[in-house]
Image (cartoon, rainbow, N blue to C red):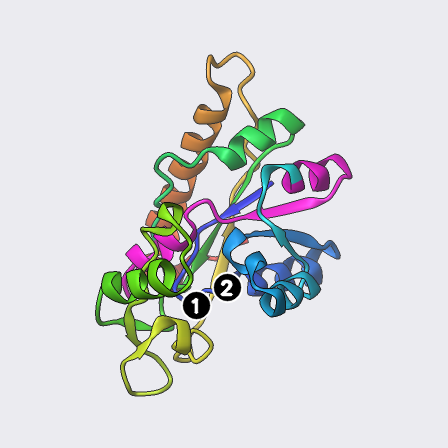
Amino acid sequence: MIASNHGRLDFDCFILMGLILRTRGRVARLMADHLWFGMPVVRRLWAAAGALDGTRENAARVLAGGGLVLTYPGGLREIMGSRFGHERIDWEGRTGFAEVAVAAGVPVIPVVGVGVNNGFAFLTSGRRLGRLLYQGLLRLGPAYSEYGDPLVIGLVPLPLPYSLAVHLPLPCKVRYVVGEPLYPDTASADSAADLAARTAETMRGLIARYGSQEGRHQAQPR
């Protein structure tokens, strides 16, 4: 189980999938937001790229077959709450990835993406546009109430809704730091919550070490 931080590039997941394939010769199956699999055209595109509907059942099936699962526990919350030039971990209440890992008896490999928030400058929180798009037009319900659609400036020097500008980021460098595998503590009363907390803590430590401007110049990530 690979856990990573999401960024404003949004398609940073495909960068990481490509790196894993190139360096390890293995295909990591991305657990994508259920939102995309409710749209027929988008569903086919994501499936062709190796993504799966991000259910626990799909993740467990891939792990049972000896495959790699790539998950972003922070999801859209992490993307929309970030700011230019800074990485963050925002997984409060999201332990599903750890529960699947514990049930499958596999470790979680923490991976930090450094630079994934450097493609866009966000000008607004996007709460109003988010309500209009996700609640008004798409009618996705309360589960998507935290989804925003902020105005951003990327390669196009005009403020655009993030949903339109997502594929036009500013040129930026992205590097990945891979932490040591974290194994479930079977002696813990709540091993999933413990594993999720240790994963988040490890990734915050990697961000503190490699995410600063100084760290980006001096560190040699794996």
Q: Which residue is mark 2?
A: 12
Residue 37 figure quarter: bottom right
Q: Which residue is mark 1?
A: 9
Whether residue 33 is visible to the viewer of this picture, yes or no, is no
**Left or right of residue 24, residue 116 in this image:** left
The amino acid pointed to by label 2 is: Asp
**Left or right of residue 200, residue 71 in this image:** right
Of residue 218 and residue 67, the one placed in the foreground of this image is 67
Disc 1 secondary structure class: loop
Q: CA distance from mark 2 to mark 1?
A: 6 Å
Residue 95: where, in percent of width, then height? 46, 33
Question: What range of the chain is rendered magenta?
Answer: 58-87
Residue 126: where, in percent of width, then height? 26, 65
What residue do we see at 30% from left, 65% from top?
Answer: 132
* Tag 2 and tag 1, C-beta contact below 8 Å: yes
From what the image shows, is residue 97 above or below residue 24? above
Whether residue 193 is visible to the viewer of this picture, yes or no, is yes
From what the image shows, is residue 99 above or below residue 156? above
Residue 20: where, in percent of width, then height? 65, 57
Crowd around label 2: few <14 · some 14–19 · many ≥20 (10 Å): some
The amino acid pointed to by label 1 is: Leu
What residue do we see at 42% from left, 62% from top?
Answer: 138
Q: Which mark is residue 208?
A: none
Crowd around label 1: few <14 · some 14–19 · many ≥20 (10 Å): many
* Magenta run includes residue 71: yes
Residue furthest right as drawn: 65
Of residue 123 and residue 176, the one placed in the foreground of this image is 123
Residue 91 figure quarter: top left
What residue do we see at 59% from left, 37% from top?
Answer: 56
